[in-house]
Image (spheres, coloured by chain):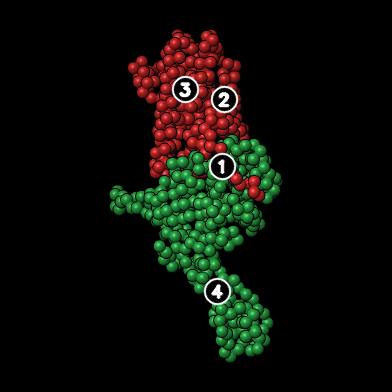
Amino acid sequence: MSLVIDAQGLRKEFTVRVKAGRLRRRKRVVTAVDGVDLRVDRGEMLGYIGPNGAGKSTTLKMLTGVLTPSAGEVRVCGLRPVAERTRLALGVGVVFGQRSQLWWDLPLRDSFDLLRHVYRVPADAHAARLRRCRGLLDLDGFLDTPVRQLSLGQRMRGELTAALLHGPQVLFLDEPTIGLDVVSKQAVRDFLAELGRAGDTTLVLTTHDLADIERLCRRLVVIDHGRVVHDGTIADLHGRYGSRRLVVAELDAPLATPPVLPGAPLARVETDGRRLVYALESAGVAQVVSGLAGLATLRDISVVEPDIEEVVARLYRAAVPVR
Amino acid sequence: MGSVTATVAPPTDSNVIPRFRTFWAISRSGFRRYATYRQAAVAGVVTNSVFGFLKCYVLLAVAGTAGAAAGYDRAQIATFVWAGQGLLAVILLWGWTDLADRIRTGDVATDLLRPVDPVTSYLATDLGRAGYAALARMLPPVLVGPLFFDVHLPTRWATLPLFLTSAVLAVVLCFACRFLVNATAYWLQDVRGPMILWTLGSGVLAGLYFPLRFLPEGVQWTLWLGTPFPSLLQTPLDVLVERDPTPTQVGLVALQAGWAVLLLAGCRWVQRRAERRLVVQGG
């Protein structure tokens, strides 16, 4: 695997002026990104998450050459992002959920045509990529509509196409599903999943919607206060925080004493003892069901997967840097 | 899906022809973008024409019975005013805050993510816009003026090509000035202060309110050599009305070119400085 993103000790400080009297202002240094190390291979799909103000967007802007790092070494596609920004632009695509890279006054088709010239893409390669995006993102209904008249969902599909028409090696997505309805969100996720399956585009996804991450990314990097607090798979994260699958047993009548089952401790008792919730450790679902079947009449059994939102919320609250 | 993504490195050649094609494509899109606002163009033409009548009557009154003022005869004054009212929209002296707005909102980040230098890209768009303005905003006043006033038509063969050159240089120079005023937003966030100064200064010193030839000669020299303002409007209009002999006109256009090169270089320098200290607003 070849390394597409290699950042070491990436750091960004901003100087802000705070009021220190009627006329006086005092300088204060705010560290937005505080020594982030990040290595991403070609074809990897990386979820890059963190609470508001954690430094996610700042990292992305440093990786794309928009912001100059205060310290650290960074290479993207083998290039130094700030010094070689215009060359790097040919190899990366960026989608900002809250900004547009399309031309407000032009129809989508004209924006795409202009991008072909801006990125100097051969006409046949451009046409082939556009054809595929039109098919997958269902663009045909609004290709001739000026961007300013598009709905958010339509615009976002346009943004994704615009970011891919020059065939980037890395696609940075900064909250691409923000504000989208369920159907548009699904369309964007399906498209990105399809892109990931092809395996030659590296995808860095920043989002607050953890369903995006669960659906798309195997690797998850969590950042808080500018530092990486988790770098691993989603399963690693659950393991680290002891989050378990839960078995929820609905009983006909409450038991005097909830049974103790080996390998599945009782997590909680709800609805006056008629609902027992067991956390699966070493035991399986079948063992819990057979353990309960002899003691009570079961009305219903369900299995609840560990909730990533809960785990991430705990992680944000803890925010102990792993260095 | 495979062919949606890159399997080979994108072209990174630096040939002049592909660069020119990119520039041309951006200019064409600038033309199309501004061509979508037709009602604004009509409103602009009406406003410019109304002010054209006002200015023309005032300046003709100044010329009075003598029939000339500051070296212009009555026909030259009418041409100066009506061509000036059209050229005002072509060079777009006022009202351009695109860059400042994008800096304030942080959208400037997307400009930096393109493989084209932002100054080049904005210039190409502006030339496209000027092309549209030449048709939609300059032509009507230039046609309206002669219906009501005697105008001066060029008598020398060199005038028209020299005027076209001068007008293009004025567009480039005015773009550079506007870019620099807008770029103060990188440092100040709010561009209203510099914009008010620019609006006040450019209107008076470019020759829009009155021809600068009304001023004492020493002041004229200082303005022409020391500031880019006369090169924005006064020079192309003086060329069109043949105010001076051809060699002087060539000299004035050369001075315009000098200012355009200097200020474009200034734009590049300011943009580079700004990028180094850029803080992109918002998430």
Q: Nearer the viewer, residue A86 or A32?
A: A86
Do circles 3 and 1 both sit on a common chain?
yes
Q: Residue B12 location, x and y as percent?
A: 53, 37
Pair 3/1: label in front: 1
| Residue at (46% x, 41% y) in the render | A84
Q: Which residue is mark 3?
A: B233
Check if mark 2's residue and mark 4's residue have beta carbons within 8 Å: no
Can residue B152 be seen here? The reply is no
Q: Which residue is mark 2?
A: B134
Q: Which mark is drawn over residue A244?
A: 4
Compare marks 2 and 3 and give the one earlier in the sequence.
Answer: 2
Q: What is the chain identity of the residue bearing mark 4?
A: A
Q: Which mark is drawn over residue B9?
A: 1
Up/down of B111 relative to A213, above or below: above
Q: Nearer the viewer, residue A234 or B131?
A: A234
Pair 2/4: label in front: 4
